[in-house]
Image: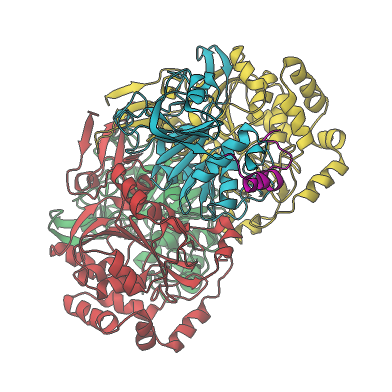
Chain colours: A green, B red, C yellow, D cyan
């Protein structure tokens, strides 16, 4: 029975993400897990996904296996349709050519605002400091639909993030537009190790759409520090398929640097 | 005065366009003179305590790692780093006491640098990768700022010095980021000539922008080639000679990172960098790999070795696109 | 509101960034589908009366001359030309009654076009070449304007719609030019694939800027090549496929201009163009070389001929740099 | 005797211009006569002059002979150090890398303001219409020292130009800076078919520096519609040398398209 197959949280997030990609669309890919999501998706589901990286690789067909630390290296940018630079990469997203963006996050709030800068204390004297925006702010600002991949740990889902590194819906409906951000953009999906969230059309608040098969909505929601909305029908997400796991473990990440053990 | 809706109010590095222009007029050489220097000479001559520095690409791919090690060896002080897409560089520059301020970008990779911020060892400002790229483009274009439609609505604004104004064409808020004209730009390239014409194969972050926008440009190059190579294929020129102040012939200059189509990343050495999570480990690393060797060539002989270099070259089998 | 010290106050073509973005979202194809069309089909499908059009390079070098002749053949009306670095294109488009407004740039070359302005046949606005280049860059970058340190102090400002504000970083006056997002961009290239990946060898005016900034992009190409050619050498890609709406295979598409490394300029035909100094001569030219032929292929057969094409190819001996 | 050699007005302007170029400096070259000036200079006097063209050719070594109409063509951009585009070309000048700019003009005033847009009537209904700025406005705005090449015809030297296409010193000392133009820039020399002018340090008004050998300052000035300042010592400019004429006529422009007959 496939459900008895063991898989890691990360493997599930990646598989979920890969299934959500749309063929023949463009995606601005952030560092780390999003890279692997795009690779798995391109391999199994969306051959005509156009990946774009902030360091100027447009449409690469990355060489597998994925080697950690080669963002920008020959394997990662292999067979791109264009090699360019960062200002051009962000021009593509700013002028509307990027359908999706995919980012990680340390912390997220009900409006999909992302913190990847610091936790606890103040900006000047934080308790924990992360790398900051990188290009995440641009991705979350410019792309039509931003997807966020985040571990389903309660402390990561907070009523108010310590710092808005990359904008979600800010304080609610209309706030992005009032801030001057491009119209009709914003967070689209939050992909966790237990569930999938969207955002309510009207309130722009995070809404539980689906849970990993075997979990209940209550189990998923209880550990979050804010209560998300719950869809009328919460669907079930199948665990990683044998195919997904084989490609992930054998072709993409055989040394399990990203997917873990 | 232009009405500003919102603005950050922290220190930022800014050189009025007219001041930068005068520097370019008076102190940048247009004559094709040989600019070949050793890394030691170039860093001694062109990097000064307190300087604002930027570099293209990362410690893992085509970063100017030999030049950064030379900066550390010379114990430069109070540097301000424009850390766009930075990985281990910021850890080393902060851990060695060289850098005291970082414009983030991407703060860096590994366990050390976040702690350094928490301990107040280094002051961070949040411009984002895109913000720094835009700032360098403004610096290159000789304008005081560029407008962007990002940074808006985020908390980066308060800890940078971007400003929000109403766009006079649409009435909507738009973010203005000030031009960035660094003191020094380090660029590691595949090929350069003795005058400073330089080319990269592959993508880059902001190579031409930063070369135009910076007061001093130090190019380190895997190979030195005839000027004719550039004139025969001018579309491949990344940076023309008159932007460049020093050319340092530096084979394996991106080590331990990869130089696409030349040599692969040394993952074991990168592991050493990743493991640094304390000042003790930092000092041990700096001592062993930087202070204890006189220069990059001695580093290659004593700390890398011909066998390892051969192995890394062997692995760099993807050459398509890189020529 | 942002305080404006001075501004021009004439018509200008402006699409708010959000409107352009929505067009890109909804109406630009990201799938790699074949976009091969004839010139006739492409112009019929993507050029509408009243459109704002731009094109890269000039009637003498790598200009999209076959596409422009097709526009004239189809008798498009009320076009607005962004005439950056334009030579004979503006004369032909105005003389044929296709264009009624010109953003100058460079108004054009030859005796006809200046007279057409004097006679009020066409309305001119003065943005300068640099101003139009900046406007296209703003359009490509998805921002409503870019700042520049030109146009200032000149009379162009009053007959464009640039604005002068106080730079909030230095307090000095700075010029803002609004983004330009044309309806259609014509680009003639050395090579394209069927999806629209396109590359130019040599310099260009604003090829990538205009391709990103324009609602519709029609590429005409001397050669159609495999997509693999682009993926093998991604630094050579001028425009990636997802910016392009139509690919027209058009050998000798720059005629009578030169296509660097492919064929030389036909100076005798250019002489015909230069000689046009009256509406009569204009109509004679249009009839003979455009209306009287069904398409570019018939034009080549009847008006140029294999012998002439061979001669022009023979003269294109400089290939260094163009591959 | 060399002085009895015949030469055209254009040949003299070109030769004069070529002698004024500075080796090891950069120059932003406008269309037409300035191109030929730069070619002649590079051939005879200033081998290390770096030419830059607005269409993105940086440092070409043009192929001779000069062929009309190839601006941007292979002969014109031959062996550049970089091929780029217009936005980058103007970035080089805007950020201060261009020592000189060289332009033609239809009309000029005492402050070196250039008109290349129209003559007579109004902007909307001109009597004669010219091509307009091209990149001239940027060249005159950005380059440190602008040199203007213009035929010595009285009607071209007017107290006030009909239209300022490319800025000189505008209304006088400090006006460029007040307008926001880059500091310490402006017109440097006006090269005519009879004379050479500079600009007075204090008043920023055009000043006669030298005249073609055989002419008097009075002869040169009398046909101008404004009175330029006259230098304390007006020097003599030798006519084109045999060498200059040979290179111009045999190597650069054998069909005399530019230099005339």
The answer, for residue B41, to whether it is visible in the render is: yes
Image location of residue D67, percent across then percent down: 69, 42
Q: Does residue D243 show up magenta in the picture?
A: yes
Q: Quadrant of the N terminus of chain D?
A: top right
Image location of residue C127, percent across then percent down: 48, 27
Image location of residue C158, percent across then percent down: 42, 19
Side of A137 relative to C162 (left or right): left
Image location of residue C207, percent across then percent down: 56, 42
Side of B149 relative to B8 (left or right): right
First to last magenta residue range: D239-261
Q: Quadrant of the C terminus of chain D?
A: top right
In-front residue for pair C15/D164: D164
B28 up-or-down from B4: above or below:
below
Image quadrant of residue A125? bottom left
Residue at screen point 69% across, 44% down: C221
Q: Does residue D52 show up magenta in the picture?
A: no
């Amino acid at each position: 029975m496939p459900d008895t197959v063991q898989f890691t949280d990360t493997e599930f997030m990646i598989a979920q993400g890969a299934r959500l990609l749309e063929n023949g669309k463009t995606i601005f890919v952030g560092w780390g897990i999003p890279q692997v999501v795009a690779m798995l998706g391109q391999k199994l589901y969306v051959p005509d996904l156009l990946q774009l990286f902030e360091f100027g690789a447009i449409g690469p067909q990355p060489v597998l296996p994925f080697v950690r630390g080669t963002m920008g290296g020959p394997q990662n940018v292999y067979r791109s349709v264009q090699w360019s630079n960062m200002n051009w990469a962000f021009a593509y997203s700013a002028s509307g050519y990027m359908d999706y963006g995919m980012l990680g996050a340390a912390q997220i709030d009900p409006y999909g605002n992302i913190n990847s800068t610091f936790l606890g204390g103040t900006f000047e004297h934080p308790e924990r400091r992360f790398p900051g925006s990188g290009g995440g702010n641009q991705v979350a600002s410019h792309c039509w639909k931003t997807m966020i991949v985040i571990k389903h740990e309660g402390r990561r889902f907070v009523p108010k993030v310590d710092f808005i590194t990359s904008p979600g819906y800010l304080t609610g409906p209309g706030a992005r537009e009032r801030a001057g951000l491009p119209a009709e953009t914003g967070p689209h999906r939050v992909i966790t190790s237990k569930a999938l969230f969207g955002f309510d059309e009207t309130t722009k608040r995070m809404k539980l759409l689906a849970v990993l098969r075997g979990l209940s909505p209550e189990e998923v929601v209880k550990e979050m520090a804010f209560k998300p909305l719950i869809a009328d029908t919460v669907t079930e997400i199948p665990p990683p398929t044998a195919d997904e796991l084989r490609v992930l473990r054998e072709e993409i990440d055989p040394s399990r640097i990203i997917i873990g053990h | 005065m232009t009405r500003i809706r919102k603005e950050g109010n922290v220190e930022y590095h800014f050189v009025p366009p007219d001041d930068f222009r005068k520097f370019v007029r008076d102190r940048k050489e247009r004559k094709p003179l040989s600019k070949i220097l050793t890394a030691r000479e170039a860093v001694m001559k062109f990097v000064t305590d307190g300087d604002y520095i930027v570099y293209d690409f990362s410690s893992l791919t085509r970063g100017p790692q030999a030049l950064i090690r030379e900066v550390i060896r010379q114990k430069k002080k109070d540097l301000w780093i424009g850390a766009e897409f930075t990985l281990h560089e910021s850890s080393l520059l902060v851990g060695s006491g060289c850098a005291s301020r970082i414009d983030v970008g991407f703060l860096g990779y590994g366990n050390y640098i976040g702690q350094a911020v928490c301990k107040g060892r280094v002051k961070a400002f949040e411009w984002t990768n895109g913000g720094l790229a835009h700032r360098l483009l403004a610096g290159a274009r000789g304008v005081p700022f560029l407008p962007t439609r990002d940074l808006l609505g985020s908390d980066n604004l308060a800890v940078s010095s971007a400003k929000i104004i109403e766009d006079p064409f649409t009435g909507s808020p738009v973010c203005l980021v000030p031009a960035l004209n660094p003191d020094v730009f380090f660029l590691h390239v595949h090929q350069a000539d003795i005058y400073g014409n330089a080319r990269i194969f592959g993508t880059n972050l902001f190579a031409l922008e930063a070369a135009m926008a910076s007061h001093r440009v130090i190019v380190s190059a895997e190979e030195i080639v005839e000027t004719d190579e550039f004139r025969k294929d001018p579309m491949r020129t990344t940076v023309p000679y008159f932007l460049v102040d020093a050319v340092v012939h530096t084979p394996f200059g991106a080590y331990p990172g990869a130089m696409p189509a030349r040599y692969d990343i040394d993952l074991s050495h990168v592991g050493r960098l990743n493991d640094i999570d304390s000042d003790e480990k930092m000092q041990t690393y700096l001592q062993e790999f930087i202070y204890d060797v006189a220069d990059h060539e001695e580093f290659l002989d004593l700390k890398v070795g011909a066998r390892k270099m051969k192995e890394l070259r062997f692995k760099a089998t993807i050459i398509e696109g890189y020529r």
